[in-house]
Image: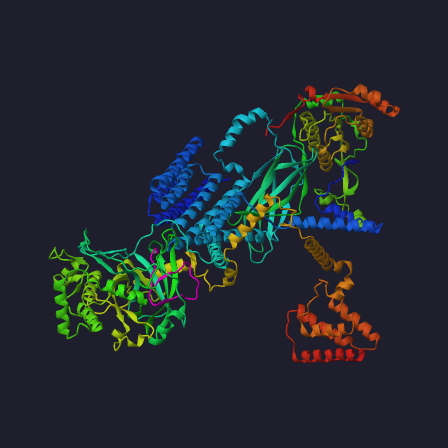
Amino acid sequence: MATANSHESSPSSGNGSSARGTSANGTAPTSFTASLWRRWLARRQRNQVRYLSQVKFRLTREGVHFVAVLLFIFIGAVIREINLLILLAGSMIGLLVLQWRFNTRTLLKLTARRRLPQYAVAGKLTSISLTLSNPKRWLGSWLVVVEDRLQKQNPNSRKLVERGMAAIEEIRPRGSAECRYELEFHERGKYQIGPTTISTRFPIGLGRGWRTLDNARTLIVRPRLGELTPNIRSLHQQLRIGHAAASPQAGTHEAEFYGLRPWQSGDSRRWIHWRTTARLGEVSVRQFERQQQRQITILLDLHSPKLKPGESCSLCELAISFVATIATQSAKVGSDSLSAAVAGDTVVTVTNVQSPVLVDNLLDSLATIAPAENPDLLKAIRSLTLSLVANPSLLIISTRASQLDSLRNSLNDPVGSKLLSRVKLKWLNVSAGQLEPYFSWTAN
Amino acid sequence: MDSELIKQLRRNLTLHFAVIAWMTAMLIATGSGGFYLPVIVFIFSLVAFIFVDTLGWFELGRVGSYVGMSVATLVAVASYIYSVVVMNSEAGQLLAVAGLLVYPECILFLQRKSLRVYEQLAIFLLLEMIVAALINDNLFFGILLTPIMLLWVSSLFLFSRYATLVQIDPAIDEPVPLFVEVMYRRFVKPMLREAPKQRVVTSRFVATSDVQETKFARRSMQTLPIGIGALVFAAVFFYLLPRTSPGVFRAGVGLKPSVGIPTELRLGLFGRLLQNPTPVMRVSFTSESTGEAYELEEPPYLRARVFDAYYPVIARGVKREQPIWGLAGSQPFHPPLQPASSIESFVRHGRADRVIAEFDIHREFATLLYSVPPLYSPAEEQRIDLNFDRFNMLLDPVEPSNPAIGKSLVYSIGTGNFAKREQVAVVPAYLPPSWVEPITTMLSQELGNFPEVNQYRQELLRKAKIDESNVFEAAEEYERHFVLSGKFQYSLDLRPPQNAEMDPIEDFILNQPKGHCQYFASAMVALLRQNEIPSRIVVGYRPTEFNSLGSFFPVKQSDAHAWVEALFSRDQLMNTKYERWLDARTPYYWVRFDPTPASGGGEVEIVAQRRQAIDYAEKLWKDYVVDAQKISGAKNIYAPVTKDNERAYEGLIQRFKNLVTSVQQGAFGSQRIGFAWPLAIAITALGVLSVGIWQVWVNLPRWAPGLAHRLGLDRRRRYEVKQAFFARCLSLLEQRGLRRSAFQTPQEFTSAVAVELDRAENKVGPSLSYLTELYYRLRFGTERSLSKEESQGIDEALRQLESIKRAAK
């Protein structure tokens, strides 16, 4: 059955995880120096977290102006010994002190819980909600601004100017309050949401207190989906895909038992295989294979000239969206089987995609892959060998003109050459507009 | 965001700033007397609130704002130049500065409101508060300060909310761009040809209405404690702020000095004199011995000027419009006030009380100082130098080059002029032997050729059967005649003389016996001098109202009074009521006579001041806030600091200047500014050592927990057992060397201990388990009390544990 090959390592979701991992990986200290070093790292990490979680205070622009006038008044009062001005300065200092105390005290001990969707789709609104709790006994918090920093991690890692922001009027003592903001991602990728900064200018806006919480999480933003035009059927015909022999193991029922796998979010409880669950101590579910109608094998070639930081390749995005749309459609149909290899900065292969979970895996991979100047097409084709044996037709979607000749030339091994010679190949050059008959963007 | 709610928030904010602007302008107006500023602010802000912020009919655009600001600034600068060059008025200059703030405010009110506009408004209003504090230091400022402060806090609440919303969604705030921004967009940006940036993410704030709303009740509830808190802080700050120099009497701003009492007295004017209720000063008397208020039975005489020379209409070939009184006998040498010992003899002889008189003179009258002789210098340091004219018994006026421009001038003098709560009429005269002849001659000189007056006087003495040579009795008879005869009446309605050829004094005595104190005093001096008694007129104040709340006499212009002083030798005063005051070493004495009858007849009495609470509040405001002399005097808690650090700022600045000069002269490295290497090394070493000790202190529990525990440095908090019997149990076991570990529950611990002690043949297991069971019940159970049997059981169990201890020992 299907195997999803992930080539990326999962990045640490929080600031503290990597250091904790270092100290908690179970390896015995090799020397006294190593032990000291680990302790120092852990301490540094702890200090960083502490520093971030401290309530910090800074004057706002209005506060700076206020202090400038205050200094003017105070110096004038002292030099000229004008007591009314000293009184005035005193009341202004009083306001500043109260501002500082409120800012620092009201944010203390506040905790935030963020609810993220499992994934987001580029071009669609994603709602993110946060619940702030105030465990303090007496002091409430007012006019709290919740701000989530956004960072794009993959592809094209960069910090973003945009931030997710929401505001809460009041969090009562020993109470909680919820707020929400919406994000519309224009680019696919893996994003870091957070850490959350909670801040307030309450009561009089002369200063701003803020606290950063250690709660950064990642969110996969899948490629924007489009629509397949009716011409896609002719493409299927050309490739002669979907013959009955493609699924010789297909059972008499619509779905046949295939194997077991660990439980994943979204699986039905009816699929749980209780005996195996009891034996392994973790929930396992049965996997089914549906009767296949068509088999599609796709190679996505994400070639792009070297991009500047922050730039994106629109042709690549179009090609990725096309593959993502085909994958989504095949999951909808339910009986199609899709095998896809994506050659970009890495090679990702997902074969026999049938269930929604596997489609999700493919879409997640498509979300994070980046184009490359020289994608490793040979490796991608080799990773599809089994699928091509079963279904000897390959649709190559590329952002450049056909590279088949050079591919054939570079295949040295006899098995590869033989395979390529019997496979029916179709090269769609996106840059030449060859995708247009089959795909169009959905009007939002 | 809900645009209606945002608009409402802006409207609210504008209204707040408008009200603050009105109130601040009113403060300026009440201090300066010019009410056009609040009127202008009121009109502009009202128009802006209605037509710009509420109806949205118009607003000043970019060009309009720039033009408006320029015009406003020009007008204010022009009025400043006018007040400096043409009017030469300090108050006018301050008003022009106020205008420089108020006119741009008006333009800002007419603009479309944005965060930037509100910021500018706030700054202008704050600066306007400074001008108001400079111009208006009356109680009114203090009264208005609280509502203004609350309004400020309320508006800052709204401002904070608006700024927060702008921070979340900058699209709600569209400020009029700055000139620099306009230029950048117009010229620089096209040159740069920057490609528009593609947004990776679009964030959308999901607003809830409660964030945008401004609930009045809630805001008020939050404003009150914060505003009052700020005011309380201000008061504490104000009174705790060390003042390193004593309150200096220096020039203030605004009013021109006014001469309360003229330098010459004019007689012969007619018409109705109006009573002038303008406050001049507050005078309080304190007993030096008790420190309490010295209450008087009669209104006091406060001496300001002396007139000893009378110039008729035609005198020495000079013709005047009216006859005048002037001063001819002033003495050039005016030494500082002498200490209390200088009047010791007089006080001892007459058994007088030593009283401290404090004069708190309003700034416009503070050119003239007042006295109550005989004087001495009090122990308390004075803000001004007090020089004493010993002959005229006057304090020197304040130098015109150092005019009084603070809120008021406060000084104290010691006086021995009171006994048994009454002011004594006799005062020793300073008259060196060489002065006797010329002075007595000058002061005995007749006012004019008044033969009919002389006849009148002689007739008066004859009727009273008093010999003319008995001068003191004669003088008393003259005073009695004016006050008690009923012929003379006090009147401020002066009529033209019946005989225009006669001198006004002669006319007053013979024809028209109605007039005010100056006429009575002049008439008596005329009689005294015809009797060859040296005499002169003294002018000052005699306040009749008393403020019992503040124990002071509020002195008004209308309290001005004139009386007479006559010079007698000691012999002439023997066997009179003043005999006990006479001292063998003092040959001459001044005796005060007041020939003016009370306006309504009868005695002049002290009455309670009307609206004394307000006056007292104003005095407190002045004493403790505006001038704050009560907190900068020698008696306050900062007195030691003050004493040692007088002119501290000046000293500091001077030292800094010296340092700069030395550096400019390249004195670094020379011997003048040396670097103390040994000291620097010692300080550094000490610092490093301190840091090291501190680090050891902090980290020792981690490095060596055992050692830290022995030293008592471990910061592990021991679990506190609140149940006394179980705490005692644990303590007994600990003394036996059995300590509960952090990982053990009490049950586990006592079980383990029981096993261990069983091994040592100490059968305490049941006792321990009994105690533990009870502890658990009291600590975690619902029943929190012990029965009598249980208490006995506990005692028994503890005794068992104690026996183990003894056995162990």
Residue B148 showing in the rendered view: yes
Q: Position of residue B547 (x, y in %)?
A: 33, 65
A140 to the left or right of B494: right
**Nearer-the-camera pick, B584 or B139:** B584
Q: Quadrant of residue B795?
A: bottom right
Residue B55 showing in the rendered view: no
Q: Quadrant of residue B633?
A: bottom left
A63 to the left or right of A421: left
Say above or below: B203 vs B623.
Answer: above
Q: Quadrant of residue A352?
A: top right
On-image quarter of the C terminus of chain B:
bottom right
Question: Looking at the magenta stretch, what is its main secondary structure?
Answer: loop
Q: Position of residue B143 (x, y in %)?
A: 39, 55
Q: How is the image coloured?
A: rainbow
Q: Residue at point 53% right, 25% down?
A: B187
A278 to the left or right of B476: right
Say above or below: B809 vs A180.
Answer: below
**Nearer-the-camera pick, A199 or B317:** B317
**Nearer-the-camera pick, B188 or B196:** B188
Say above or below: A293 vs A67.
Answer: above
* Residue B150 shown in magenta: no
Extreme-right residue of the structure: A414
Counting every numbered tag in the picture gives 0
Q: Which residues are magenta?
A: B366-389
**Nearer-the-camera pick, B212 or B380:** B380
Q: Position of residue A215 (x, y in %)?
A: 66, 46
Say above or below: B410 vs B83.
Answer: below
Q: Position of residue B232 (x, y in %)?
A: 47, 58
